[in-house]
Every structure is written in structure tokens, then in C-alpha cells.
């Protein structure tokens, strides 16, 4: 009888611990998927003009445009998870320095920054919105106006999926930084960095994310789409970014069939490399070769 009571107690403790971890996993996801207030996008140095469009659901999306006279092309920049366009200010300043004849449009994704919306996606729901911004630029500057794209983290995921779906008109190249292979592993990596046991949270995330996002997780797997992308792509990954697994980029790069380059960085971001760094000129050279 005593042995049975011990087994029952151990089992009950395990169930309670599992329920507690499930609750914490659900709370972790909720806090990152849903915003509670509008955060106005503020830039410290740049002074872009504000532009707004409506997406297919009549939500008002906000963009921040740096315009130059007689621009050769336009760069559309897409920020990462839980961020807004101002988080890309350093990157935009760098692109200004190497592409002085380029317009730069930094967008606030749906539910982020100054754009409408109550939910945060994980890149995939932003795909059609990027298509709308792409159309906006072409309507503004002409049917033959070249466009290239930069995305970070979930922004990079959205661009890879948009490119794979053939939605990006006049696209000359993609620059994707710190992207991930699939959504479940992305959240598992975030939780691991917060001290949660990955071996337990990974299967729990399958349940939580399927419930929260209401789509099969296979549909949120970047590896399913990467082979369809035909736009020349530069993959940038930095070991110092603790939001994504550094190793994900190698599977993405190896499975991509487009013209491609790889920039694996160990410390400084690409916009702060010194003149002697072996990758210092790779981004410029990539852009020169691809529009």
C-alpha cells in the first residue's frame, strides 16, 4: 500500500509539474504573440516621411520612407519579432552609405509599431502585406522600378516565403538576416535561452502554437518553401543574436537553389565590420552583382 502511495504521489507531482510548464509555455507564447498597446515608431537619427496603406483586411499599415531624387531603386526593410521599423535604424543608415541612390522604406508589420492589428504573427502572416508594400513602391515609382529587400528574424522569414511564392515583383535580391527553419524550433530556442528545458517545451510548443496560430505547424516551416525561391539571396547569421539558432542558416543556405551567398558572423553586426574583416565588402559586392 505504501509503495502504491509513493508511485501515486510521484505521478501526481509529475502531472502538476507538467501542467505548470504547459501554463508557462502558453504564457510565454501569448506574451510574444499579442500586443497590448500601440507603440509609436520613433527614430533617433533618421527623419523618414510617414506613408500608409491598407492591406487586404482593410488594416492600416505604416511605413517610413527615406526618399532620394531620381532613385535607381528602392530597398524595403522588414523588422524582427516584437520590434518595429525603428529597430532597423542602424542597418538603414549603413544601406544609405553604400546605396546613396536608393530609396529606403522601413515598414511596421501588422500589429507592430504604428500599424493596425492586435496580434503578432511570426513572419508568415506578413507575406501578403509585404506584397502590398511592393505594389505601393511600383505604383509610386514606375512599373520597371527595381526593388530589393532586407529582413531580420521573422522579417527574413516573411521575405523568404514571399519570394518562394513569387509575390515580389521587380525583386532583384533578398538579404535575410538571422532567420530560422521553423516556428516551433524558434520558440524552443527562445525558451531555452530563458532557462526552460528544451526537451520538454519543444513538444508542448507543438500544442500551444497550433492552438494559438490555428494553422498546421508544417505550414510554418521555412524549409518547405526555400527551394522555390528564385531571387538571389544573401544569408546573414550572427552568433551574437540569441534569438535564433546560428546553425539554422546552414540548412537554409544549402537547400536554397537560387543564386546565393553566405555571411556567417561571430561578433559584430554586418554594418559595423572593420575594413580588415573578410566579409566587409561581401554585401556591397552581392548587391553589385544582383541589381
Image (spheres, rainbow, N blue to C red):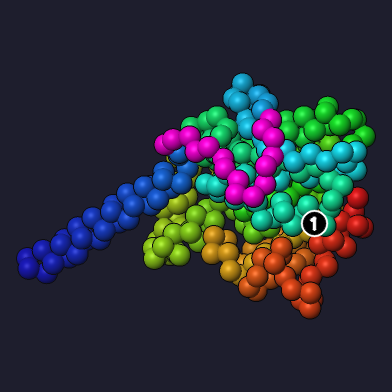
Q: Residues within 10 Å of mark 1 (few under 14, many from 20)?
A: few
Name, please, the residue furthest toward the bottom.
276
- 153 and 65: which is toward the camera: 65
Q: Can residue 208 be found in the magenta stretch?
A: no
Against 43, is 281 above or below? below
Q: Point out residue 149 in the picture as x, y percentages from the top left corner.
A: 77, 47
As helix, strand or loop, the secondary structure at mark 1 comes to helix
| Residue positioned 90% across, 38% down in the render | 70
**Residue 180 occupies quadrant:** bottom right
The residue that mark 1 highlights is 97
Q: Is residue 147 visible?
A: no
**Residue 5 occupies quadrant:** bottom left
Q: Point out residue 177 in the picture as x, y percentages from the top left corner.
A: 68, 57
Q: Point out residue 209 in the picture as x, y percentages from the top left corner.
A: 47, 45
| Residue positioned 28% across, 54% down in the render | 20
Name, please, the residue furthest toward the left.
1
What stretch of residues is rendered in magenta?
Answer: 36-51
Amino acid at each position: 500500500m505504501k509503495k502504491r502511495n509513493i508511485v501515486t504521489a510521484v505521478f501526481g507531482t509529475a502531472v502538476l509539474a507538467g501542467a505548470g510548464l504547459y501554463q508557462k509555455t502558453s504564457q510565454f507564447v501569448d506574451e510574444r504573440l499579442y500586443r497590448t498597446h500601440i507603440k509609436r515608431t520613433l527614430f533617433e537619427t533618421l527623419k523618414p516621411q510617414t506613408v500608409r496603406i491598407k492591406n487586404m483586411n482593410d488594416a492600416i499599415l505604416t511605413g517610413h520612407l527615406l526618399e532620394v531624387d531620381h532613385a535607381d531603386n528602392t530597398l524595403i526593410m522588414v523588422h524582427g519579432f516584437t520590434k518595429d521599423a525603428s529597430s532597423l535604424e542602424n542597418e538603414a543608415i549603413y544601406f544609405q552609405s553604400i546605396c546613396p541612390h536608393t530609396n529606403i522604406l522601413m515598414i511596421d508589420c501588422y500589429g507592430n509599431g504604428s500599424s493596425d492589428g492586435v496580434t503578432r504573427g511570426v513572419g508568415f502572416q506578413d507575406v501578403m502585406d509585404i506584397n502590398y508594400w511592393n505594389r505601393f513602391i511600383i505604383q509610386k515609382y514606375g512599373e520597371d522600378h527595381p526593388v530589393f529587400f532586407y529582413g531580420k528574424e521573422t522579417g527574413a522569414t516573411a521575405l523568404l516565403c514571399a519570394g518562394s511564392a513569387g509575390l515580389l515583383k521587380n525583386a532583384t535580391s533578398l538579404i535575410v538576416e538571422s532567420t530560422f527553419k521553423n516556428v516551433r524550433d524558434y520558440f524552443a530556442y527562445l525558451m531555452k535561452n530563458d532557462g526552460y528545458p528544451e526537451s520538454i517545451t519543444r513538444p508542448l510548443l507543438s500544442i500551444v502554437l497550433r492552438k494559438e496560430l490555428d494553422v498546421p505547424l508544417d505550414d510554418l516551416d521555412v524549409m518547405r518553401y526555400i527551394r522555390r525561391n528564385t531571387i538571389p539571396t544573401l544569408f546573414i547569421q550572427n552568433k551574437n543574436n540569441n534569438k535564433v539558432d546560428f546553425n539554422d542558416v546552414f540548412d537554409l543556405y544549402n537547400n536554397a537553389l537560387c543564386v546565393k551567398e553566405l555571411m556567417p558572423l561571430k561578433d559584430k553586426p554586418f554594418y559595423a565590420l572593420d575594413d580588415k574583416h573578410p566579409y566587409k565588402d561581401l554585401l556591397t559586392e552581392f548587391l553589385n552583382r544582383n541589381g
